[in-house]
Image: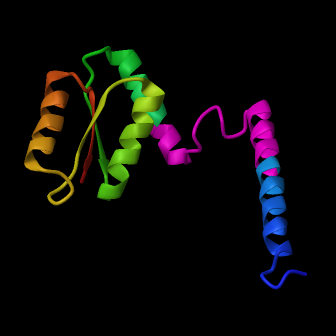
């Protein structure tokens, strides 16, 4: 064997090629059976929230305003993203001091009040 470990780089390259093929095969299987590709994985609590939002919007029309409170700032943006993806409506987010500027917070509140974003996620 080479003093500089000549066979090791070749083994690493072969391993990468095998890993790449395994990943392609796994992606193909996931897309063919729909697992993890139809809807994002969400908890029962999030599923119930989405159902409630859809029902409110269906029963009360376009002028419905919904405020969702999260306990943690870190959850406000992912919840807003999920709601926006599933309901296809604009969602504004307003979080506490330190995570948004006053201007960002005011813009989010204005878009909610004007109806541009009928859903607002914010921290409790």
Magenta stretch: residue 58 in it? no
Drawn side of residue 48 relative to residue 114, left or right: right
Quadrant in which the N terminus appears: bottom right
Numbered marks: total: 0
Magenta stretch: residue 37 in it? yes
Image quadrant assignment for residue 40: top right
- Direction right: furthest residue: 1
Vertical order, 37 against 114 (above or below): below
Q: Name the residue at 86% across, 80% down.
A: 2
Q: Name the residue at 59% across, 34% down.
A: 39
- Direction top: furthest residue: 61
- Direction bottom: furthest residue: 3
From the top left corner, tell me how far across and down residue 102 is, in percent: 8, 48
Can residue 33 be seen here? The reply is yes
Q: Work out whether residue 40 or residue 61 is closer to the camera in this orientation and state it.
A: 40
Image quadrant assignment for residue 97: bottom left
Q: Name the residue at 25% across, 52% down.
A: 123
Drawn side of residue 49 relative to residue 43, left or right: left
Quadrant in which the C terminus appears: bottom left
What colour-coding does the image apply?
Answer: rainbow
- Over which residues does the magenta segment extend? 22-49
Q: Name the residue at 48% across, 31% down.
A: 51
From the top left corner, tell me how far across and down residue 38 is, in percent: 64, 31
Q: Main secondary structure of the magenta part?
A: helix
Can residue 71 be seen here? The reply is no
Q: Work out whether residue 5 or residue 18 is closer to the camera in this orientation and state it.
A: 5
Image quadrant assignment for residue 82: top left
From the top left corner, tell me how far across and down residue 42 is, in percent: 55, 45
Drawn side of residue 47 relative to residue 83, left or right: right
From the top left corner, tell me how far across and down residue 13 is, in percent: 79, 61
């Amino acid at each position: 064997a080479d003093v500089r470990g000549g066979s090791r780089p070749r083994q690493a390259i072969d391993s990468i090629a095998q890993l790449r093929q395994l990943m392609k095969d796994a992606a193909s299987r996931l897309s063919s059976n729909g697992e993890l590709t139809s809807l994002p994985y969400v908890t029962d609590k999030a599923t119930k929230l989405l159902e409630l939002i859809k029902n409110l919007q269906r029963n009360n029309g376009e002028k419905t305003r919904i405020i969702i409170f999260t306990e943690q700032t870190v959850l406000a943006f992912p919840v807003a993203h999920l709601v926006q993806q599933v309901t296809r409506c604009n969602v504004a987010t307003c979080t506490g001091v330190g995570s948004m500027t006053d201007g960002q917070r005011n813009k989010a509140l204005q878009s909610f009040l004007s109806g541009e974003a009928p859903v607002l996620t914010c921290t409790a």
